[in-house]
Image: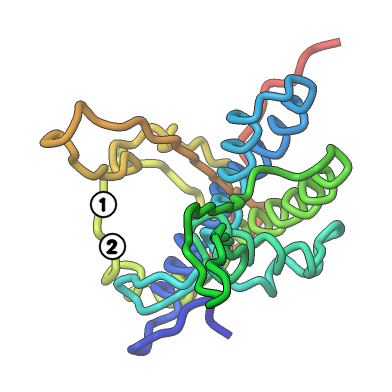
Amino acid sequence: MSNVSHQFKMNAHTQSSNDAKLGIKAYQNLVGSLHAFDRFVALIPTGDHILLSSVFCFAVVKYAKPFVETETSFGKTRYPVRHLKNEKGFDNAIHIHLVELRNTLVAHDDLESIEPRILQFCLSVNPSGFSIPVSVAVSNKCLAYPINAESVLKLKTHVEACAQGALNKIHSDFAKIRDAALKHPEQADEGARYKKDYGQARIEKTGSQLQPPDFMTDEWLNSNEPNFSHIHNGLLYEELRIRRDFYGPERIKLPDGSEIHISPPVTNQPVG
């Protein structure tokens, strides 16, 4: 079953690519949430109300972002929780709780969750009993942060499990992208937005050991950023890069029916 609510049918390569894009967004947000809960625990001894509140709200928003429906070029989507439920430490009640906190007390002011209370002080005019308000008071509460470290550690354990599950799913999606490219090369070629020739590499049909270039520094990986120069001098962005290698040992059947054998690169082993 797809991760995306599609408005049109996608080929296997495009769908796997979109799943990976959705997954890496989810993973980076979950890692950000995990780091925030870590920092929260370290900040507890300071008793700094502003920092504790800010870090907790940041952690909740980061956690919930993947699970809030969003509009994309490939339809409305959200990250499926089913990819995470089998991870040790996952707690469905905590998942629901964190998303609910985001939707009611953090990202929105929900008047129904914590209702502001208004109280009037009146003078009663006897014998008519007519009341004259002479004072009005209002009280309100906003979410700050959990009461103790024990509560936060439970949240952190859950978020850590989710981050690991999302990372596992990304590696699975990488394998699906590669598998689709091998089975349907025309799909991979049709959907390619960028190509670069890194030079020739000789692969012997009897078996070759790969020595790939450092393509992780390729300029294509530098995503475009929103331009806010008309408002301020710009924003800093956190970047995450993940890679999975498929260097064999493996036999790959070519379209002409022949096969090639790929082996992992040779690593220099220390002598003695």
- The residue tagged 1 is 195
Does dot 2 land on a helix, a strand or a loop?
loop
From the top left corner, tell me how far across and down residue 16 is, in percent.
48, 71
Residue type at mark 1?
A: Lys
From the top left corner, tell me how far across and down residue 269 is, in percent.
74, 20
- The residue tagged 2 is 192
The answer to whether marks 1 and 2 mark residues whose Cβ atoms lie closer than 8 Å is yes
Is 90 displayed left or right of 96 in the figure?
A: right
Q: Which residue is found at the position 54% from the left and 54% from the top?
A: 138
Q: Up-down: is 7 above or below 252?
A: below
- Could one spot residue 76 in this view of the protein? yes
The image quadrant that residue 223 belongs to is top left
How many circles with numbers are drawn on the protein? 2
* Tag of residue 10: none
Colouring method of the image:
rainbow
Q: Up-down: is 183 above or below 147?
A: below
Does dot 1 land on a helix, a strand or a loop?
loop
From the top left corner, tell me how far across and down residue 114 is, in percent.
62, 63
Residue type at mark 2?
A: Ala
